């Protein structure tokens, strides 16, 4: 039953993103007087829809995108010189003045830009709403980057980091918070970064080698912790929200509401600390110092091995933790707009840096998420509530806008590139040549999509969240 909800959530979110994108093209095409023949959510055969006026509004069978079909696209009439003025009812080469190819190039550029711009506008609106009604930030991500635990034999351990150390410089970024550390790590995998940290008040300058973890291909705190950088997520003991029946925690007598002050001699302030400590000890018996209603209690238990779980979490005790402390505020409208602009700018710069990193081989293409990975992220966001869904939708919308602006044939950016070339040449590129280029690009994108989907399934098989 869960898979049905995941598919439904994915279809709603992606369908809305595509609807907004294609509506941008549709609206500007209509304003420019272009005849729109088809407005489709999805590709392939038509499932259902209706015709209103001259446009067929349809839902198609493959829900991985959409398109707006305008009259006069990719005709085989041959090249023609287009005037910059507004033509009359017909053109001298037999085309209708309402054909896309008959409109001035500046109008066609506007139509191509309209889709990505619609996505950027949507992202801005969503993040402004989040900032105005529920601006939530995990406390540890914006404070000092304090290390809670360093797994044995990790890159951080080899660099000399220890529990309680504070990172004061990371890849040239001074006094970084964990958001900055996470971003710089994701953009420099398989490369060394300069690292400075304080240990007992003493500064150490060293280099941290960022090797891609064998079972962590996604950007995220998972990758960060497997390098050995486990953040201190709170200053208070780790709180337990639920205890799974029949697990070591249940058999030992732990209860929801308990707080773990110590596991052996380690004070955990994140679930990752617990996971990696248990892994480092290969599941050896552990002693927990617990606070229950302010009273100290001691429990002895033996962790269980969970086959099929990620390697860092194969030894488990059987509880869920209280969510990491967050700061929530409602920003005034003006401040919410500024915050949305900042968040969108940061997201866009990160996406562009990822693209740059892929070309410079600082970022692996295996880190990309396809439909399966995106569906999992959407389902996780739905479980957290409306505001995380809005934030994820904004991120997807920004990604969609930037991706479509890439100068690749069949994408909006490719169309704009052709139009700019034609403007310089002062004539159209041969339509037959253009169509052949589009066909080759289409095959390449399909192959790339298959690779990303295979990568998604592989990570799913490996048990990634």
Image (cartoon, helix red, strand yellow):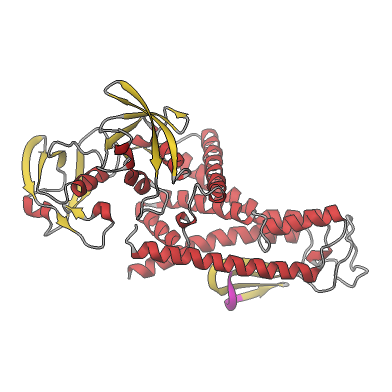
Numbered label tally: 0
The answer to whether residue 346 is left or right of residue 162 is right
| Residue in the foreground of this view, choosing between 42 and 306 | 306
Give the residue at x 32% y 61%: 463
Q: Quadrant of the C terminus?
A: bottom left
| Residue in the foreground of this view, choosing between 107 and 418 | 418
The answer to whether residue 425 is left or right of residue 251 is right
Task: Report x, y in % for residue 433.
Answer: 77, 69
Outermost residue, top side: 201
One can see residue 290 in this view: yes
Task: Report x, y in % for residue 287.
Answer: 9, 43
Task: Please report the bounds of the magenta region as a residue range.
Answer: 42-49
Q: Quadrant of the N terminus?
A: bottom left
Above or below, 381 against 179 in this view is: below
The answer to whether residue 2 is left or right of residue 391 is left
Task: Report x, y in % for residue 106.
Answer: 80, 53
Above or below, 173 against 89 in this view is: above
The answer to whether residue 145 is left or right of residue 281 is right
Instruction: Reply yes or no: does residue 203 show up in magenta.
Output: no
Give the residue at x 18% y 53%: 316
Quadrant location of residue 179?
top left
Task: Report x, y in % for residue 253.
Answer: 7, 50
Give the residue at x 29% y 29%: 165
Above or below, 125 against 11 in this view is: above
One can see residue 11 in this view: no
Main secondary structure type of the part rendered in magenta: strand
């Amino acid at each position: 039953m869960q898979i049905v909800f995941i598919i439904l959530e994915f279809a709603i979110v992606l369908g809305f993103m595509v609807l907004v994108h294609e509506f941008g093209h549709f609206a500007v095409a209509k304003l420019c007087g272009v005849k729109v023949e088809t407005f489709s959510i999805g590709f392939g055969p038509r499932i259902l829809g209706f015709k209103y006026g001259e446009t067929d509004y349809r839902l198609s069978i493959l829900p991985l995108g959409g398109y707006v079909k305008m009259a006069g696209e990719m005709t085989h009439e041959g090249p023609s010189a287009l005037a910059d003025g507004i033509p009359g009812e017909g053109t001298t080469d037999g085309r209708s003045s309402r054909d896309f190819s008959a409109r001035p190039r500046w109008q066609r550029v506007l139509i191509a830009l309209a889709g990505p711009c619609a996505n950027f506008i949507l992202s801005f609106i969503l993040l402004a709403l989040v900032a105005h009604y529920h601006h939530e930030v995990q406390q540890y991500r914006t404070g000092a980057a304090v290390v809670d635990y360093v797994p044995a034999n990790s890159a951080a351990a080899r660099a000399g980091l220890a529990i309680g150390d504070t990172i004061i410089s990371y890849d040239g970024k001074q006094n970084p918070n964990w958001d900055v550390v996470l971003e710089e790590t994701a953009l420099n995998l398989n490369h060394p970064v300069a690292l400075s940290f304080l240990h007992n008040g003493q500064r150490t300058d060293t280099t941290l080698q960022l090797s891609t973890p064998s079972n962590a291909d996604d950007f995220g705190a998972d990758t960060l912790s497997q390098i050995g950088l486990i953040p201190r997520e709170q200053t208070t003991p780790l709180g337990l929200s639920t205890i799974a029946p029949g697990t070591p925690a249940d058999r030992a007598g732990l209860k929801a509401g308990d707080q773990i002050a110590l596991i052996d001699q380690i004070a955990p302030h994140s679930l990752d600390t617990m996971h990696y400590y248990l892994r480092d000890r290969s599941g050896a018996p552990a002693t927990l110092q617990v606070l229950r209603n302010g009273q100290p209690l001691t429990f002895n238990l033996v962790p269980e091995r969970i086959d099929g779980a990620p390697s860092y979490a194969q030894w488990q005790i059987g509880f869920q933790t209280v969510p990491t402390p967050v700061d929530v505020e409602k920003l005034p409208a003006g401040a919410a707009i500024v915050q949305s602009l900042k968040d969108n700018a940061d997201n866009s710069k990160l996406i562009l840096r990822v693209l740059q990193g892929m070309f410079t081989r600082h970022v692996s293409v295996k880190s990309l998420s396809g439909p399966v990975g995106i569906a999992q992220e959407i389902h996780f966001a739905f479980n957290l509530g409306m505001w995380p869904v809005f934030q994820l939708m904004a991120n997807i919308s920004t990604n969609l806008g930037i991706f479509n602006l890439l100068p690749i044939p069949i994408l909006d950016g490719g169309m704009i590139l052709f139009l700019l070339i034609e403007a310089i040449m002062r004539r159209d590129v041969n339509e037959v040549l253009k169509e052949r280029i589009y066909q080759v690009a289409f095959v390449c994108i399909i192959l790339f999509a298959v690779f990303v989907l295979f990568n998604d399934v592989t990570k799913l098989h490996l048990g990634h969240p």
